[in-house]
Image: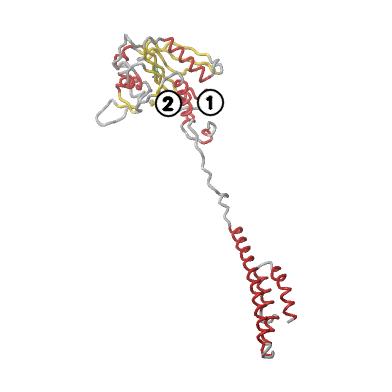
Amino acid sequence: MKRLDAILEAAPGLIDGAADLPALASVEAELLGKSSVVGELRRGMGKLDPEQRPVVGAKLQEAADQLKTQVARRREVLEMAAERELLISDRLDLTLDAWVPTVGTRHLITQVIEEVTDIFLGLGYVVADGPEVENVWYNFDALNTPDWHPSRLESDTLYVEYRERDDVLMRVHTSPVQARYMEANDPPVYIIAPGRTFRTDTWDATHSPSFHQIEGLVVDEHITFSDLKGTLIHFVHEFFGPDTEVQFNPHFFPFTEPSAELHVKLDGTWLEMLGCGVVDPDVLVNVGYDPDKYSGFAFGMGVERLAMPKYGIKDIRRFYENDLRVLRQFP
Ligand code: PHE
């Protein structure tokens, strides 16, 4: 019995000292197994006096239960620890090869269109648009373009085969939006119309068969060439900077009279930026406006032409190749 008391006293230290489940299993065998003190005493029960047996038996059972409970408690703790360790070592680091979504940016052409549009929105203009596939009436006739004008030839204009018609084409400028807008709306007109345009140009450093223009049109009472000048000078100063020099040089367009080309001096060089002029009264008549009551001015600028000097792009093809090394420079 003394040995049993000694075991019960030593047991908690042994049990709690077991660092893992295999260690606990050997402690358990040591305390409760066949060759343990408890096991030995159990085997010796038969040799005891009959009246001693229940007393010793009860004591032994109580000791065994006590040891079993202690072992079970420790086992629970060790099992939880083992589980936790397994979870930690087994964990997938989901952030390691996570897919990072890339955020796109607007193309430089779009950015320049928005920049220009914003300047005119600030002056009270509204945005208008029209189809890229046009017909001869809106692209040429309504705009007072004579039959003999070379821009009508297939050498300049891309015609579209559409059913039996021979008057369908890719618009060569954004000017047809002028005619379409005036037909559908009464004056006053203050519009800006950005969009894509097409010509039979050969792809090189300064030409592309598809490019972009921004059209402007004002029609109101008492509009003069001075309004045109003031407006475009304001635009150039907003877009290229307040000290930029500007020249209006006489030119010809069928739909404006007088007409001019606007040149801008950038880094010491005069660059042609846009065509403009006072709306020809014949155009006003074509769309049903009274030319004695209303007058106006119009202009059309090349988006790539504005963007190239401003953003230092030397080859127009860079705009359309979608080379990420280029696109990433204009976030
Ligand atoms: N449509 C002309 C061009 O493409 C530009 C222009 C627009 C000229 C409006 C005068 C008025 O060259």
Characterize the local packing of mark 2: few (<14), some (14-19) or many (20 or more) Cα atoms within 10 angstroms.
many
In the image: residue 278, left or right of residue 162: right
In the image: residue 10, left or right of residue 254: right
Residue 34, position in %: x, y? Answer: 66, 82
As drawn, 81 above or below 308: below
Mark 2 secondary-structure assignment? strand
**Count of residue discs:** 2
Alpha carbons under labels 1 and 2: distance apart: 16 Å
As drawn, 113 above or below 45: above
Numbered mark located on residue 228 in the image:
none
Tell which circle, 1 or 2, labels the residue nearer the N-terminal end: 2
Give the camera-side residue of 300 and 297: 297
Give the camera-side residue of 6 and 209: 6
Q: Three-letter amino acid code at disc 1?
A: Tyr
Quarter of the image where one finds residue 197: top left
Q: Residue furthest left?
A: 164
Q: Residue at x 32, y 18 (%)?
A: 186
Residue 1, position in %: x, y? Answer: 73, 82
Residue 137, position in %: x, y? Answer: 29, 21
Mark 1 secondary-structure assignment? helix
Instruction: Report which residue position mark 2 lands on.
Output: 212
Characterize the local packing of mark 1: few (<14), some (14-19) or many (20 or more) Cα atoms within 10 angstroms.
few
Quarter of the image where one finds residue 161: top left
Residue 259, position in %: x, y? Answer: 40, 12
Give the camera-side residue of 39 and 290: 39
Q: Three-letter amino acid code at disc 2?
A: His
Instruction: Report which residue position mark 1 lands on.
Output: 311
Give the camera-side residue of 117 and 48: 48
As drawn, 126 above or below 250: below
